[in-house]
Amino acid sequence: AQKITQTQPGMFVQEKEAVTLDCTYDTSDPSYGLFWYKQPSSGEMIFLIYQGSYDQQNATEGRYSLNFQKARKSANLVISASQLGDSAMYFCAMREEGFGNEKLTFGTGTRLTIIP
Amino acid sequence: NAGVTQTPKFQVLKTGQSMTLQCAQDMNHEYMSWYRQDPGMGLRLIHYSVGAGITDQGEVPNGYNVSRSTTEDFPLRLLSAAPSQTSVYFCASSYSGQLAKNIQYFGAGTRLSVL
């Protein structure tokens, strides 16, 4: 069965510093996708970044990058030059590949607080 | 530019009442799903659908019913509300297919309290 583990319930980071949010996963499927979502205090779930298990390079989207270490089954989110608006809950999620198999498994999340 | 629309945003029920949470998407996505979010537990899948007329159970389906008569709509029914169903409910949709990279887009959520 799929499992996602986020071991940091909360983090405090100084504004403009880089921050790494940890995510480890467990799956026996060789083909899968990893996602990060942001949930600000307003409650909506915002897609940030995606990494496929066969992607050769780490995914990047603006200030977000994904440090993907397949052998260690980790997919850490890196936010560069943090901003006050980055304060939110962050969720890591995984989907195993397969037709009709769009089910996402989520971790428990990390609450990030940016300190001015 | 609506995306995934959920109604209502807030709801208070008494134990034993029934209600339907509405979800509609305008992106022609085949896949739709319902999650619940409880403190410290992330999001858990309740029910999902890979197309009109096709639904299946997720991780926590008890106490909920769904149907999918159109591509656009995927309502979630609470049959007899219980305090354990107090939660935030999210609807999500995506394209369906072989590849893992289909991004799921979420509605704004429905905050439900059962007294």
Image: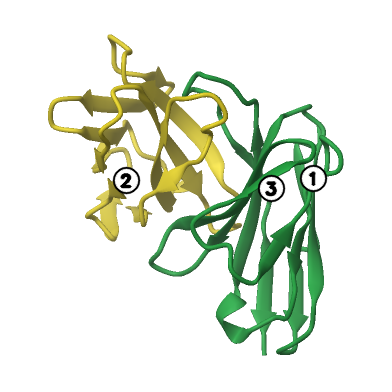
Chain colours: A yellow, B green
Q: Mark 1, residues whose alpha carbon is within 10 Å: few (<14), some, or many (≥20)?
A: some
Residue B46 picture location, percent across and down: 58, 57
Q: Mark 3, residues whose alpha carbon is within 10 Å: few (<14), some, or many (≥20)?
A: many
User: Which numbered disc covers residue B36?
Assistant: none
The residue drawn where x is 64% and y is 84% is B82
- Front residue of A57/A103: it is A103
In this rendering, the label closer to the viewer, 2 or 3: 2
- The quadrant where residue A69 appears: top left
Q: Is residue A51 left or right of residue A48?
A: left
SS category of the residue bearing label 1: loop
User: Which numbered disc covers residue A1?
Assistant: 2
The residue drawn where x is 54% and y is 24% is A99
Q: Is residue B8 above or below residue A83?
A: below
Q: Is residue B22 above or below residue B95?
A: below
The answer as to whether the residues below labels 1 and 3 share one chain is yes
Whether residues under marks 1 and 3 lie with C-beta atoms below 8 angstroms apart, the answer is no
The chain to which mark 3 is attached is B
- Residue corresponding to mark 1: B68
SS category of the residue bearing label 2: loop
The chain to which mark 2 is attached is A
**Marks 2 and 1, how far apart at CA:** 27 Å
